[in-house]
Image (cartoon, grey):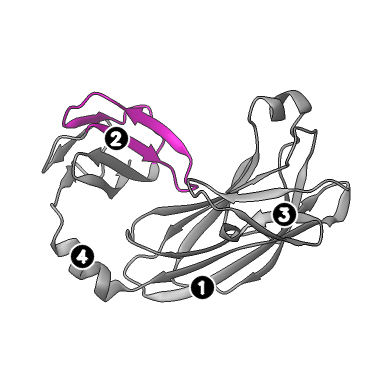
């Protein structure tokens, strides 16, 4: 049987062992603290040691996220509100694998002011061999009191009008770029104008998150399109 590798995006960790038929870094078990109660994403990448055609299937093992938290799960293939019991990623061809296409999971989380801790575990495996797989997990903590103290030391900004249907103005600083996400955590707009206005006329009515990048860091605000 062939091995599968699981990686946490943007972390470089050495391979340390085998579980069933997987070889993986320690980062397959992600332990994180929420720093933005409005929106934060936590991603784990999945790959094979050599390019091959593969489809990753998965099933939920456990989910103890607090009920007050809002979250969605995206994988290579789509997104779902909450975390379903099972799922299948889009098949990857040999050519796609050779070009760097990999499988991945990303939990999109909004805690609001609700402190808590939760663990999500997912068993991911080769769709042609259930035993060729292993468990990945997200252990997430949010401390509202600590986050509040941190927020007091950061610069503030606002977006108006809110609700909006045409253009919105960013008041507080000028963003290098602005990314808008829908309720599933999917990127629906990107503005790289270095100005203090964003065009939202093309967005459907709903709730969105605006993530602004500046020299001082990344800031996020909730935006309603009417």
The residue identified by callout 1 is: 118
Q: Quadrant location of residue 18?
A: bottom right
Label 4 – label 3 distance at C-alpha = 38 Å
Residue that lies at the very extreme toward the left in this rendered image: 172
SS assignment at label 2: strand
The residue identified by callout 2 is: 178
Region in magenta = 176-205
SS assignment at label 4: helix
**Mark toward the viewer: 4 or 3:** 3
User: Looking at the image, do the residues carrying marks 4 and 2 touch, with CB atoms under 8 Å apart?
Assistant: no
User: Looking at the image, do the residues carrying marks 1 and 3 touch, with CB atoms under 8 Å apart?
Assistant: no
The residue identified by callout 4 is: 150
Label 2 – label 3 distance at C-alpha = 38 Å
SS assignment at label 1: strand
The answer to whether residue 141 is above or below residue 12 is: below
User: How many residues crowd around disc 3 within 10 Å: few (fewer than 14), some, or many (20 or more)?
Assistant: many
Locate residue 130 relative to residue 63 in the image: left or right: right
The residue identified by callout 3 is: 23
Using the image as rendered, state which of residue 125 and residue 107 is in the foreground. Answer: 125
Sequence-first disc among 4 and 2: 4
Label 1 – label 3 distance at C-alpha = 26 Å
């Amino acid at each position: 049987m062939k091995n599968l590798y699981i990686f946490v995006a943007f972390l470089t960790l050495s391979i340390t062992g085998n579980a069933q038929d997987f070889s993986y870094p320690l980062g397959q078990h992600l332990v994180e603290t929420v720093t933005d109660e409005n929106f934060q994403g936590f991603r784990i990448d999945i790959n094979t040691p050599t390019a091959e055609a593969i489809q990753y299937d998965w099933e939920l093992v456990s989910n103890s996220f607090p009920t007050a938290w809002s979250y969605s799960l995206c994988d290579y293939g789509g997104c779902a509100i909450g975390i379903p019991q099972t799922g299948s990623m889009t098949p990857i061809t040999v050519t796609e694998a050779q070009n760097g296409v990999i499988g991945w999971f990303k939990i999109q989380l909004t805690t609001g002011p609700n402190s808590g801790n939760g663990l999500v575990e997912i068993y991911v495996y080769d769709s042609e061999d259930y035993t060729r797989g292993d468990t990945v997990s997200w252990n997430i903590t949010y401390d509202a009191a600590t986050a509040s103290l941190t927020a007091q030391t950061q610069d503030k900004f606002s977006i108006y009008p809110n609700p909006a249907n045409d253009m919105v103005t960013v008041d507080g600083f000028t963003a290098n770029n602005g990314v808008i996400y829908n309720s599933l955590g999917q990127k629906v707009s990107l503005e790289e104008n270095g100005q203090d206005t964003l065009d939202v006329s093309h967005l459907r009515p709903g709730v969105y998150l605006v993530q602004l990048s500046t020299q001082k860091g990344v800031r996020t605000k909730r935006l309603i399109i009417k």
